[in-house]
Amino acid sequence: EDQVTQSPEALRLQEGESSSLNCSYTVSGLRGLFWYRQDPGKGPEFLFTLYSAGEEKEKERLKATLTKKESFLHITAPKPEDSATYLCAVQAGDTGFQKLVFGTGTRLLVSP
Amino acid sequence: DTEVTQTPKHLVMGMTNKKSLKCEQHMGHRAMYWYKQKAKKPPELMFVYSYEKLSINESVPSRFSPECPNSSLLNLHLHALQPEDSALYLCASSQDHRGRIYNEQFFGPGTRLTVL
């Protein structure tokens, strides 16, 4: 069974304090790994797609990387507006390509 | 344009009511999804439509009835819901899987449903 585990569950940072969020996965035939940002009471906002090991994507203060077993979301010099829940999800296998298997998310709080 | 819209934003209904949630996208996507999300949990897939045909039903109770009138619209009809059905209901869309390695899903803002 495909599994996605995110850590830490919650992370509190000071403004400007860089850190990384982890997403480890166990799947049969990874098709794509996705990062989303979700603000309270709103729908997930698409951030990145990663497909092959070694791939990196960047957007403003965020950088996502992928290995064969995990993905990291690096946050450089975060600001309070980066506070949100960050969700990792995978698509895998021959029949599961329409399904997203989500991790439980990391709740990030950035204090001024 | 990567926008998926959902109406209403909030809905309060009694257990005997019938209501509908609506979702619309104009990205030319041919796959559309309904998810249910409880507080502090990730979204749970309910239904998938591919080319206006129901492709996946994740064993959802029959009090939830999806409908895809055309390639841009997705409805979720609600009847005789229970208080435990209170949640954020999310709609998403993506390119259809055919010929693609992966399909990025784009989510709408959600409908906050409260069942009394």
Image (cartoon, coloured by chain):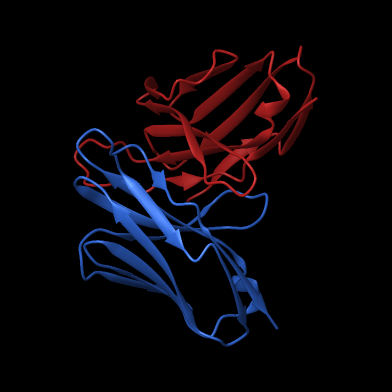
Q: Which chain is blue?
A: A
Q: Which chain is red?
A: B
Residue B99, image quadrant: top left
Q: Is residue B103 visible?
A: no
Q: Is residue A15 left or right of residue A75?
A: right
Residue B14, image quadrant: top right
- Nearest the viewer among B37 and B93 is B37
Where's the C terminus of chain A, which quadrant?
bottom right
Q: Is residue B92 left or right of residue A112?
A: left
Residue A64, image quadrant: bottom left
Residue B15 percent across, percent down from the top left: 76, 16
Q: Is residue B51 left or right of residue B18?
A: left
Residue B111 percent across, percent down from the top left: 66, 37
Tell me which residue sits at (27%, 47%) in the image: B102
Q: Is residue A72 above or below residue A32?
A: below
Q: Is residue A89 above or below residue A98?
A: below
- Nearest the viewer among A32 and B23 is A32
Tell me which residue sits at (52%, 46%) in the image: B42
Q: Is residue A3 left or right of residue A36?
A: left
Where's the N terminus of chain A, which quadrant?
top left
Residue A72 percent across, percent down from the top left: 37, 70
Q: Is residue B95 visible?
A: yes
Q: Is residue B88 above or below residue A57?
A: above
Tell me which residue sits at (44%, 39%) in the image: B93
Tell me which residue sits at (66%, 36%) in the image: B87
